[in-house]
Image (tube, grey):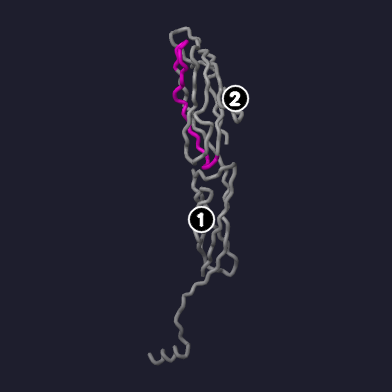
Amino acid sequence: MKKLLAALIAAGVVCAATTDAANTSGQFNVNITLNSTCSLSTVTALDFTYTSFQGGAATASNGGFTATCTNTLPYTFGLQAGTGAAVPPGAATITVTDNRVNLQYVLGTSAAGGTGSGAAQSYNITGTMAANQSGTCATASCTNAAATNKTQTLILNF
Amino acid sequence: MALDATSGTLLGLSYSLALSASGSGTGATQSYNINGSMAASQAGTCGTGVCTGSQTRTLTLTW
């Protein structure tokens, strides 16, 4: 048998099995269109505490919010008095006289804007109320809960 | 069939690629797809309103 196999191999009748693979390839593109965007969190209410004719200006507390924008996308903030449809870009500051307690205040933002990082970035609405205002209050203490112009608009431009 | 890479990052967005199937020859044209997916909630990187980008990948058919 061994002699027969050797003879067949010598004659080229039996060959070692091969498993050579063949292949072909092609290229294709992965195309991406990225639309930039920004989102704004809710803004916490600003709180003023004021005593009629006080000698120094009052500064509001709270007013924090976050802006989340596409990485590297620049953006700016604007303010607009009232709750009407936003008219971009808004103003850097707005002055409002509360129609319940008759105190005037000025609102601004802690920064004019920024550049998106892909994560939430924190800012504040700032508020000041000038000294020596009388205000209107028939009792010892009043709030502007019933004011109709206490809600303002923050605009995020990008 | 195989891809040279099954994932990539473009414009700060990660994506993955996968082949729809492998098969056996029939003597006729057979259709397949390369499926792409991109996870939700990615920020991406784009300093303007709209950005575009492209990467070239290779599909290899082995038999």
Secondary structure predominantly adopted by residues drawn in magenta: loop
Residue placed furthest toward the front = A55
Query: How many numbered discs sit on the rendered protein?
Result: 2
Which residue does the image show at 43% across and 92% down from the upper left?
Answer: A7
Q: Chain of mark 1?
A: B
Residue placed furthest toward the left = A2
Q: In the picture, which quadrant includes the N terminus of chain A?
A: bottom left
Magenta residues, start to end: A49-73
Which residue does the image show at 51% across and 31% down from the upper left?
Answer: A111
Q: Is residue A157 above or below residue A99?
A: below
The residue that mark 2 highlights is: A84
Residue placed furthest toward the right = A87
Q: Is residue B25 above or below residue B37?
A: below
Residue A57 magenta-highlighted? yes
Q: Which image quadrant for residue A6? A: bottom left
Q: Is residue B41 left or right of residue B52?
A: left
Q: In the picture, which quadrant includes the C terminus of chain A?
A: top right
Q: Which of the pair A36/B31 is nearer the observer?
A: A36
Amino acid at the residue labelled 2: Gly
Amino acid at the residue labelled 1: Leu
Q: Chain of mark 2?
A: A
Q: Is residue A61 left or right of residue A150?
A: left
Q: Secondary structure at mark 1?
A: strand
> Residue A24: horizontal and vertical position, in percent?
55, 68
Q: Which image quadrant for residue B33? A: bottom right
Q: Which mark is residue B17?
A: 1
> Residue B39: horizontal and vertical position, in percent?
49, 47
